[in-house]
Image: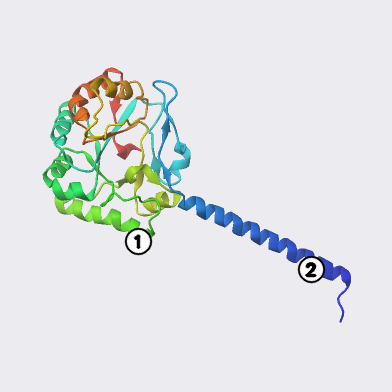
Amino acid sequence: MQKSPLRVFVGVITMVLLGITMAKGYESYQVSSAKALTSENWGLGFSTEGEAPTANETPEELKQWGAYYIGNQNEKKIYLTFDCGYENGNMESILDALKQADVKAAFFLVGNYLETEPELVKRMAEEGHIIGNHTYHHKDMSGLGEEEFKKELTDFEVKLKQITGKECDMFYRPPQGKYSTRSLQMAKNAGYKTIFWSLAYVDWYDDNQPTKEEAFSKLLKRIHPGAIVLLHSTSKTNGEILPELLQKWKDMGYTFGSLQEL
């Protein structure tokens, strides 16, 4: 039986429209997949003294992956964190200053630090500080496959428990601040909250340390409600100014919170 020209025409149009729809869907999938794998560097922009900076993502966008760069912006509270890649003689003074000021911090460690400084790691845990996961080998995690990504976290967890007898606090900081939406999702799937920061300064060059005045010009002028502050424990300047810095922040009306509150 011969089909009518109208039915043939309708069939052709239907197939064309279906093809267009499928092509658009595939194109959308490709864009979405590419975005998920795109590596980004965490960045901040400061415009007004005493106010929160703008960042790559908004707090609301980050929360879908269990990630944070700032706390409650209506509360004058600071979340103090340190990144610790290796020990060069500053940690004792940092821990002493925190103990004297009755301030708890979060220390994001790597595997090298666990291996070489077990006694300092034990002290951090014993004095009530959070020990966060900065990965075992400090790799760029943004493009890793799921198996390798998870191994970087679990190897750290195992080593930390061997040293302290305690489970790892489930906070993760991406090495070098590099991330992708896929890596954020993998961290969430592993049970971690990803912790970026809303205040940091160039303090990591051992041979080009900022002066006390340079440090205060950034850390006092740019402090803001809900700030997650990132300092590097390798900074000689940080070790020297920390007692005064903590007191100055307190004098400005700030208190100190725990990442557990986020």
**Residue 173 in sight:** no
Residue marked by disc 2: 11
Based on the displayed image, in which of its 4 quarters is residue 78 positioned? top left
Task: State the quadrant of the C terminus.
Answer: top left
Question: Quick one: label 2, few (<14), some, or many (20+) residues within 10 Å?
Answer: few
Q: Could you say whether the residue bearing mark 1 is in a helix, strand or loop?
A: helix
**Residue 49 in sight:** yes
Q: Relative to 100, is 130 above or below?
A: below
Which residue is farthest top?
251
Label drawn at residue 147: 1
Q: Could you say whether the residue bearing mark 2 is in a helix, strand or loop?
A: helix
Q: Nearer the viewer, residue 128 or 51?
A: 51
Left/right placement of residue 23 relative to residue 202 reads right
Residues at badges 2 and 1 in contact (C-beta under 8 Å)? no
Place of residue 80 in the rendered image (x, y in percent of width and height, measured from the top left): 28, 33
Q: Relative to 168, is 234 above or below?
A: above
Task: State the quadrant of the N terminus.
Answer: bottom right
